[in-house]
Image (spheres, grey):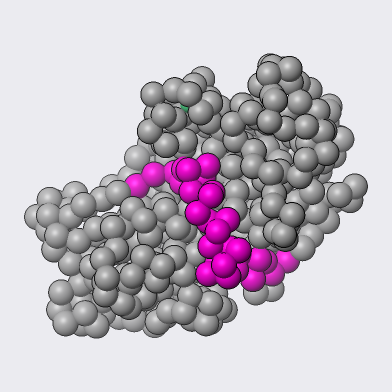
């Protein structure tokens, strides 16, 4: 089968690889119909995630047709069209029982902090992902969800990560009616967080980025007030001024460790790798939120850790909430939101690329060329 192959930072290509097999009674093999490239894949692509091994197949956002199931999988059969949450979760451990499916204690033998994630380095279990024609899905009796007949597969594939992540960012922020919510990052995750902030009762939604084409999109889509941080003298001062000197009630970091906007963070984190990428969006979130406010972090940060203004967190009495999205927990209500038209995920898809052209797709998405918001990869056979 054909699958994406990681060759080192900024180098990916398509390779012929062995067909995945059932390795455990709870496995399934899925024939991919669509997969996406995510901002999280860019952290791998840019070499910011430790133990990303040459030869790995990325791809944690995919849906597809069940090809084969292991003997213990009774709720799926060959031919079912499923969307597969990016978290690999057993559904039974101490953490899964609490709905913390991104923190499964069983699915990642390589580390305890995070559960397994498809195609996300050996720090997240070393599982091959879905930027391929076929993929092995562990715990298939728990994770995959059959795509409802009425649902467009383009919406379904975005329910594997982006929609739940944006929604959980707003949920963790504990938004109260009328709150001012400031979202850092107008990528798919930030766009979705801004949209969902309204569902939780926000009174004002602000989105910060430096890519005007994305700000234009989210301005209509969320809708939101948008600002380009490169056009502001001091983002934090601006945020205070526009909120009567108080700061936003809630700040959401939907950027993570690939953030731009501060030369020192870039040198320290992205060039010298003395911290895990640049944490400038998190600095801005902490410094722009009001005293007693909440900072909700879904932007990805990894080992070895980042320098963050902890003194300000303490002195301002902030609450910081963060996690990988717990996709399976949120799916039932998000499927209802899509059905009711409250969320229109597929509107974010700007590029539909044959799997064969995967290296071009990474390049375009990484460099934010051609108005790219969300690229979807479609295998030839699908
Ligand atoms: N927690 C989770 O479960 C989860 C799931 C999916 C993605 N993520 C993470 O969410 C983040 C966003 O993902 P995405 O797919 O939207 O990525 P993306 O790369 O498409 O978007 C990131 C956006 O942030 C902007 N940006 C850069 N520096 C900024 C700054 N200092 N302030 C404001 N904006 C800035 C970029 O211009 C870009 O538009 C990534 O870190 C990704 O790893 C987390
Ligand atoms: Zn993702
Ligand atoms: Zn578990």
Up the image or down, 256 lies above or below 232; here it is above
Up the image or down, 25 lies above or below 251; here it is above
Up the image or down, 44 lies above or below 193; here it is above
Residue sticking out furthest to the left? 315
For the record, the magenta segment spans 322-351
Q: Is residue 294 left or right of residue 159?
A: left
Task: Find residue 287 and report its image quarter.
Answer: bottom left
Q: Residue at x 50, y 60 (%)?
A: 189
**x and y percent of residue 208 in the render?**
40, 73
**x and y percent of residue 58 in the render?**
66, 41
**x and y percent of residue 158 in the render?**
62, 56
Q: Residue at x 64, y 71 (%)?
A: 347
Q: Is residue 185 left or right of residue 39?
A: left
Q: Residue at x 78, y 40 (%)?
A: 80
Queried whether the magenta region covers residue 73, the answer comes back as: no
Residue sticking out furthest to the right? 381
User: In this figure, what is the number of numbered marks?
Assistant: 0
Depth order, front residue of 330/260: 330
Depth order, front residue of 238/19: 19
Q: Residue at x 33, y 53 (%)?
A: 172
Queried whether the magenta region covers residue 338, the answer comes back as: yes
Task: Find residue 74 and report its image quarter.
Answer: top right
Question: Can residue 368 be seen from the camera position used here?
Answer: no
Task: Find residue 64 and report its image quarter.
Answer: top right
Depth order, front residue of 320/267: 320
Q: Quadrant of the N terminus?
A: top right
Q: Is residue 350 left or right of residue 163?
A: right
Question: Can residue 332 be seen from the camera position used here?
Answer: yes
């Amino acid at each position: 089968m054909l699958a994406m192959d990681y060759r080192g930072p900024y180098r990916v290509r398509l390779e012929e690889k062995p067909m995945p097999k059932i390795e455990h009674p709870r496995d399934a093999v899925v024939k991919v119909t669509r997969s996406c490239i995510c901002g999280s894949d860019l952290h791998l692509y840019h070499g910011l995630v430790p133990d990303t091994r040459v030869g790995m197949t990325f791809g944690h956002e995919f849906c597809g047709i069940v090809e084969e199931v292991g003997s213990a999988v009774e709720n799926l059969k060959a031919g079912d069209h499923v969307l597969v949450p990016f978290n690999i979760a057993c559904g039974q451990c101490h953490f899964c029982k609490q709905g913390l499916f991104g923190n499964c204690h069983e699915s990642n033998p390589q580390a305890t902090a995070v559960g397994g994630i498809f195609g996300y380095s050996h720090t997240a279990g070393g599982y091959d992902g879905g930027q391929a024609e076929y993929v092995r899905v562990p715990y298939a009796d728990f994770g995959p969800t059959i795509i409802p007949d009425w649902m467009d597969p383009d919406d379904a594939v975005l329910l594997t990560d982006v929609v739940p992540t944006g929604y959980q960012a707003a949920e963790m922020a504990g938004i109260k009616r009328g709150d001012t919510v400031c979202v850092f990052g107008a990528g798919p995750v930030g766009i979705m967080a801004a949209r969902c902030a309204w569902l939780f009762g926000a009174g004002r939604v602000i989105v910060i980025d430096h890519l005007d084409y994305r700000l234009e999109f989210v301005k209509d889509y969320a809708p939101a007030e948008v600002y380009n941080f490169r056009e502001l003298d001091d983002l934090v001062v601006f945020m205070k001024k526009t909120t009567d000197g108080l700061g936003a009630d809630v700040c959401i970091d939907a950027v993570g460790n690939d953030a731009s906007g501060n030369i020192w963070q870039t040198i320290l984190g992205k060039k010298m790798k003395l911290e895990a990428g640049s944490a400038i969006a998190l600095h801005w979130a902490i410094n722009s939120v009001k005293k007693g406010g909440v900072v909700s972090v879904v932007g990805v940060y990894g080992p070895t850790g980042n320098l963050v203004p902890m003194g300000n967190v303490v002195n301002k009495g902030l609450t910081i909430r963060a996690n990988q999205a717990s996709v399976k927990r949120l799916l039932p209500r998000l499927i209802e939101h899509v059905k009711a038209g409250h969320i229109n995920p597929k509107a974010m898809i700007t590029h539909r690329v044959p799997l064969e052209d995967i290296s071009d797709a990474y390049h375009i998405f990484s460099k934010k060329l051609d108005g790219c918001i969300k690229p979807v990869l479609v295998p030839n056979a699908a």
